[in-house]
Amino acid sequence: MPLPKAELHLHIEGTLEPELAFELASRNAVVLPCSTTEELRRAYLFDDLQSFLDLYYALMAVLVTEDDFDRLADAYLARAAAQGVRHAEIFFDPQAHTARGVPLGTVVEGLARALDRSEERHGISTQLIMCFLRDESAESAMRTLEAARPYLHRITAVGLDSAEVGHPPSKFREVYDAARALGLRAVAHAGEEGPPAYIWEALDILRVERVDHGLRSLEDPELVKRLVRDQVPLTLCPLSNVRLRAVDVLEDHPLRAMMDAGLLVTVNSDDPAYFGGYVGDTFHAVREALGLGQEQLRELARNSFRASFLDHDEKRRQAYLAEVDAYVF
Ligand code: ADE
Ligand code: ZN
């Protein structure tokens, strides 16, 4: 039995495995840039975030119907369950679908179908986080928030993703204020490729409760002090950082140094179909590469539940934490 854990940084579109992509492409008459799954997997050699995003957005074209989104999410949940995930807070990118003519309702209702069965079928509790594409305009993000009004009961928080550099969090101040006024919580990608200043902006301007990645935090000692003081969770994605060349090799990843500095970090998979592993694989990889001991792995699992948006159900959080404490390696 794998270590129980929560997954807090997972783009559902990044779980599209080549086999499902080809099946949906043929069903929806979409032409893919490659003709075999092997050829597609060989294309997964990225130079940076943008080179990945180009393929990620291109492959999404196969997601058209509610059933496609249901299939995608259900396939992820099955894989996640096998790797010990007990709770998942799942990102989706509405603008990447509405821009292709797929209505927001199709996306949310399709994902919700899978999420509604998740506890019974996979033993995983779930939440949805709606991300704005930061390389699109703030007006487009605001229109997306407006369009999401009928589905807000399905959505826990807003997030910010896509190409980071040149698109600081401050660009989305008004959208985040509006989201908060609608009762949504807030997270944002910051410090993946962008500088520590973007992490400050995410904290002080967007008032996020968690920072997604925050990889570059250690470059700024004052920022570290702030993140440690407030115990702001950072949802790290070590395999993603290697594949997108933010770090050269896993052995150089700052995860361990960040734990030692007192930061509240979690380990996540980001876009597992593209980066070589789901979250259990990621735990194994960092254990090997960084020489983490059992108690450090347990601490990472505890952090994942501590950092989760389970505040409305503290009993459940405590039950998950008890599972972690009772886990025998
Ligand atoms: N969208 C999907 N994965 C992403 C990542 N790692 N960074 C920013 N945007 C993303
Ligand atoms: Zn991400």
Image (spheres, rainbow, N blue to C red):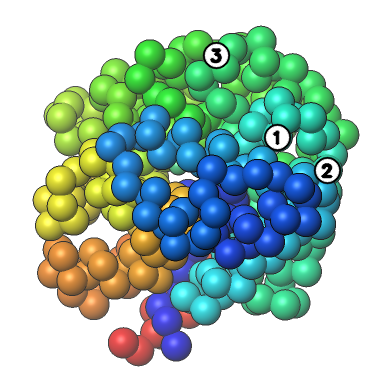
Between the residue at mark 3 and the residue at mark 2, the CA separation in whole angstroms equals: 28 Å
- Mark on residue 173? 3
Q: Residue at x 36, y 70 (%)?
A: 281
Quarter of the figure with residue 153:
top right
User: Relative to 138, is 306 above or below?
Assistant: below
Decide if residue 114 is on the left or right side of residue 241: right
Q: Residue at x 44, y 62 (%)?
A: 38
- For label 2, the residue is 106
- Under mark 1, the amino acid is His
Residue farthest to the right, as pictured: 150
Where residue 115 sits in the image (x, y, percent)?
A: 73, 61
Quarter of the figure with residue 295:
bottom left
Where residue 316 sits in the image (x, y, percent)?
A: 61, 68
Q: Residue at x 60, y 21 (%)?
A: 176
Judging from the image, what secondary structure is the residue with disc 2 in?
helix
Q: Residues within 10 Å of mark 2 (few under 14, many from 20)?
A: some
- Under mark 2, the amino acid is Thr
Q: Are marks 3 and 2 in contact (CB under 8 Å)?
A: no
